[in-house]
Image (tube, helix red, strand yellow):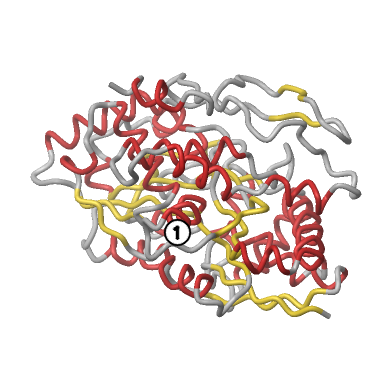
Amino acid sequence: MTRISAAFLPLTDSAVLVAAREKGFAAEQGIELDLIRSESWATLRDRLVYGQVQAAHMLAPLAIAVTLGLSQHPASISAPFKLSVNGNIFVMGTVFAAALDPDIARRVEDPIATAHDFAAAIGLYRRKPVIGIVHRFSCHALLLRYWLGYAGIDPDRDLVLRVLPPSLMAAALEAGEIDGFIAGEPWSTVAVQAGSAEIVMVGARVWQRGVEKVLAMRTEWMDANAETVDRLLIALDRAAAWCDDPAHHGELAELLARREYVGQNAEAMLPTLAGRLIVRSGEAPVEVPATMLFHREAVGFPWRSHALWIYSQLVRWGMAEPSPEAEARAADVFRSDIYRRALADTGAPMPGASLKVEGALSKPMGVGSHSAGLILGPDRFFDGKTFDPADIEGYLRSFG
């Protein structure tokens, strides 16, 4: 057995790592997978960078920020596998949410109207809303900025953004320390179940296939342990397929509910897995298909265009200085070449390219693949824009 330690945060999208250990997929590949729970993304980052663990369940933008030296001193991080897409949910306290569309299904289904409602509600509020984000370099923060920016809201001017670990968000909202938060599940559902919040925005309705968590490794360790990395990726791919199967969602929720993993009741995990979200406590669930995906549509494939979209947003919001060198280093964090090597002989659908125009698919579509047929799901942004990784400057100019 090869022993690998992987750090994770208590979130529903740690599912693939949990299943890899608990359902034996890692052991089948000769890997003893130790899962090390962390409470904050900063702690998880440091555990990976300083060699306490060999792998981590990491925010995709954080992997790029560490590589570019934006989060601490530069350290080369590689992401050869995506652990999930979608999954972020934005909630606000019930007082603020009362100023939004009372039709909760319409609120979730029409992010354009809700963004404008949110802008108007800020104008009526007695102070700047304090919004919890899990990390400055997170998909949560970038998605929130993207969505609110559409309605003319400057997140740095019109809001107070406060970084908190996701597991503390619901308690902070209950205590009145924040007015709302965007986090990975189950923490938004926990706040709604407690009656202290309502869902305002669902990430899957802002970007239909938004990149979320990646498996991150120090590049030096990954290169020195190629055979082990390949076995780990095979185990994770099989675990992801198991997690995606609705027949397993009940068992998966029970696994995640254990104290050593998420430590919340299984009922808090199921709405996201099933795509049936409780927007307001006491009301019927709202159907939101693809709230979180683990495997189908080649979810695990690390598209370099996803990395470049993240880079574009870091530049847009003044978090990174644009340069050809930084752009290339950001793209290189997503290691589609390692994914192809590891899964080449498994029959996994394998995209024929490593970049694509993001936001161009409005319906499922078959694409070129070197093995089994591959259908990609719709990936539209809510504002109708498309992101061409070959023209990042033009894309950024489109925001004015």
Q: Quadrant of the C terminus?
A: top left
Left or right, residue 130 beside residue 248: left
Using the image as rendered, state which of residue 318 and residue 143 is in the foreground. 318
Using the image as rendered, state which of residue 46 and residue 379 is in the foreground. 46
Residue at the spot x=46%, y=19% of the render?
384
SS assignment at label 1: helix
Left or right, residue 222 beside residue 358: right
Above or below for 99 versus 20: above
List x then y, in percent, for residue 37. Answer: 54, 75
Q: Residue furthest front?
A: 325
Residue at the spot x=46%, y=28% of the render?
109
List x then y, in percent, for residue 81. Answer: 67, 52
Quadrant hosting residue 98: top left
Callout 1 environment at 10 Å: few (<14), some (14 to 19), or many (20+)? many
Residue at the spot x=86%, y=68% of the render?
29
Q: Quadrant of the N terminus?
A: bottom right
The amino acid on which the numbered mark 1 sits, given as a three-letter code, is Val
- Give the residue at mark 1: 66
